Amino acid sequence: MEKQTIVSGVRASGKLHIGNYLGALQQWVELQNQGHNCYFFIADLHGITTPFKPDELSQNTLDVAATYLAAGIDPEKSVFFLQNHILEHATLAWIFNCILPLSELERMTQFKDKSKSHKENINAGLLTYPALMAADILMYKPSAVPVGEDQTQHVELSRVVARKFNNRFGKVFPEPHTFMRKPLRIMSLADPAKKMSKTGDEAILMDDSPAEISRKLKKAVTASEAGHKSPGVENLFSLLEHFGSKEEVAFFHDQQKQGNLKFSELKETLAKDIAVYFENFREKKQELLARPDYLAKILGQGADRARTVAQATLTEVKQKIGLL
């Protein structure tokens, strides 16, 4: 298999749930272990575009770092770092701001959505968020960017930015493609019509205790309108296919066909499977959180490696555009 340069990041916005794991983190670990040249970062600068508290931001950042390392990101195999440690990201984002038309930024779906949900805080960062994201991506000249469905528009914009820059100043950036598996949508336990989010009992967090997993699943919605398939039940079966055994999946599908499916039994089995799946992860994460100095060291070493590449890219960009 051809070795690719891979870049992806995650916001430092609280604990990750099993939808985050299946949709992103699991894929990152697989790509890393396949030998690709991987750059994975925590997007803490993106995290301040929406309302935040400083102490929560720093704690969330450490939590996300511990989560990714405990789940299998290996700092010996991947470059793992904090976005804010690489000042070149912000500089390149400013340069991109100066070549991107305002109309390109205003049409971004995420800007529209966040402007509606954070009407009291429609700041300039929300608007120029995609320029920073393009800088995050293009800085390392990747061939592929693993993202979820909701981020494909941003990857496309990074391609637009690369094209505009190359056409105007000369070739510097490759146009990365979106690296996606079959679209994966893990739905909310409380409202299976929408994607799982981190709030309340809608999500199973990766580090939830077995008792908490069981409690949340017992409350998971399974009812549906007459004559329609239940999206809640479909969501539970989707989770069982990821975390359960083939025998369990076959058994419960057979029970469903015969009209003998017991939701309580399905939920109990699923709770056990998810708890066992993340057992080692929970232990490793607690060990890492108890060693904040070690986490800081790992992130610092990753930043040193990323900075070497970022400085070279920014020097090349400055030369192209005439900055002394």
Image: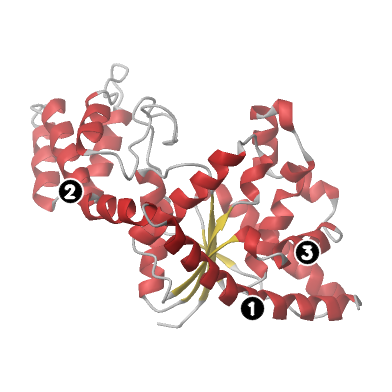
Q: Could you tell which of marks 2 and 1 lies nearer the N-terminus? A: 2
Say which quadrant the N terminus sits in.
bottom left
- Where is residue 142, by image quadrant? bottom right
**x and y, in percent, of residue 5 in the image:** 53, 76
**Foreground of the two, 174 or 121:** 121
- Which SS class for mark 2? helix
Residue 91: image tag: 3
Residue 20 rendering spot, x and y as whole percentages? 41, 48
Q: Is residue 200 above or below residue 272?
A: above
Q: Position of residue 281 (x, y in %)?
A: 28, 54
Residue type at tag 1:
Val
Q: What's the residue type where badge 3 is placed? A: Thr
Give me the disc on residue 309. 1
Identify the residue position indicated by label 2 in the image. 276
Q: Residue at x 72, y 42 (%)?
A: 126
Image point 79% across, 75% down: which residue? 166
User: Vertically, is 196 above or below 157?
Assistant: above
